[in-house]
Amino acid sequence: MNLEAAVAPGFVEKAPLERYVDPDRPSLVGRSRAELAAALGEIGVPPAQRKMRVQQLWHWLYVRGATTFDTMTSVSKELRAALENRFTVARPEVVAEQVSVDGTRKWLLRLPGENQRPHEVECVYIPETGRGTLCVSSQVGCTLNCTFCHTGTQRLVRNLTAGEIVGQIMVARDRLGDWPGQCPPDGTIVPTDGGRLVTNIVMMGMGEPLYNFEAVRDALLVVADNEGIAISKRKITVSTSGVVPNIKRTGDEIGVMLAVSLHAVRDGLRDELVPLNRKYPIEMLLDACRNYPGLTNAKRITFEYVMLKGINDSLADAKALVRLLAGIPAKINLIPFNPWPGTRYECSDWETIEKFSEVVFDAGYSAPVRTPRGRDILAACGQLKSATEKLSARERMALRAMAMTE
Ligand code: SAH
Ligand code: SF4
């Protein structure tokens, strides 16, 4: 396939770094009700009025997707002006948008950085029949260095704020025309029948969400609020490489679905693939899973398992995997490895993946193999790495070659 053709629609030219200036006023996007009340207090709204004003703001921000205070017509003119003076409703700035031939969309977003240099993260939309999943980032880069993951090779790391996490969902809905009364741009693949385009959220973009627990929690509680963006907690999944102390908190304090990046059935190998395993080994991780609050057969944990040729893909591994998970309400997600320039791994052969999935299937698990999506725009799992680090000409060629062979 032709990469240029695949990314042409809606492609936004990259702005040079020199043009970046930190925002002069803070954005209200992503704030909780209590934080909105505090913001109103700052501009002198008397306590007795705050609750009603918060309700109004909440509605305009999260139900209507207002991008200016001006459009908030139920709010008095004076208050709109006072808000405008002190705050914005800005989302993270879109630096580039790429549209894959399969309908996957990837946005490169610019966030305030240091010394007038912005940070960048990526956010990916994947339409499928009946649902549209948004893959959201929790950090710029990642402090963990899983050896098969491209994001882990990025040096620059910072936690995103709750506003920046909610902001990714707002940007996606803006760009998809997914607010009431809007139409998606021409050529958008609309996965639902007249319903919303973003129906599911997965915290599977850049970063380890459980190393940015508070911001992820606060953001997801805003996203799940049923008077606002209203994406049900059953349709939100947090994926972790195994930050054991925060697994129980995820169930207790957020109450969303959990995915665990397992990838190996023996500690020796997992120590190498997911170095965090040295701190929280497999048995400790599975114990936390067994005790995940709210775990039932109807609300299972998804175990992710990336298929690496000759590394973790033998039939013995498959059998050990089902033995290991016995007794835990689980789903197993086999992910074909997505290669990236410079990686030492290869994806398992298709035949091997099929045989592996048969063992898993025979043990009573549905074993869907997650087909890589958006590979032509480098949007598939583990390939999210912002353009902060420039690709060499050789790497770019390798990427093009990959896109062609898909
Ligand atoms: N840090 C979290 C969430 C982000 S990674 C975590 O590790 O779970 C999202 C998923 O993509 C994880 O299961 C991760 O192991 C997987 N992944 C990373 N790199 C990959 C690659 N190159 N190919 C396929 N899957 C990959
Ligand atoms: Fe970080 Fe997840 Fe990548 Fe590991 S797989 S480096 S935890 S983003």
Image (cartoon, rainbow, N blue to C red):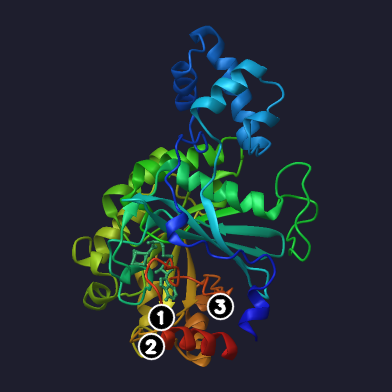
- Pinpoint residue 384: horizontal percent, then vertical percent: 45, 68
Cβ–Cβ under 8 Å for marks 1 and 2 = yes
Marks 1 and 3, how far apart at CA: 26 Å
Few, some or many residues within 10 Å of mark 3 (<14, 14–19, 20+): many
Q: Compared with residue 66, is residue 350 higher up or lower down, i.e. above or below?
A: below
Looking at numbered disc 2 in the image, what kind of residue is underneath it? Answer: Ser
Residue 88 higher or lower than 295, as above or below: above
Q: Tell me the SS state at disc 3.
A: helix
Residue of label 3: 375
- Residue 97 is situated, as x and y percent measured from the top left of the image, at 59, 64
Query: Residue 330 appears at what percent x and percent y?
Result: 46, 62
Q: Amino acid at mark 3?
A: Arg
* Structural crowding at the residue carrying mark 2, measured as other residues with C-alpha within 10 Å and reported as few (<14), some (14–19) or many (≥20): some
Q: Residue at x 68, y 79 (%)?
A: 5
Vertical side of 263 occupied by 58: above or below:
above
The structure residue drawn at horizontal position 52% and vertical position 46%, both measured from the top left corner, is: 167
Nearer to us: label 2 or label 3: 3
Residue 406 vs residue 183, the one in the foreground: 183
Q: Residue at 78%, 51% (x, y): give it.
A: 183
The residue under label 1 is: 318
Secondary structure state at the residue bearing disc 1: helix
Tell me which label, 1 or 3, sits earlier in the chain. 1
* Residue holding disc 2: 314
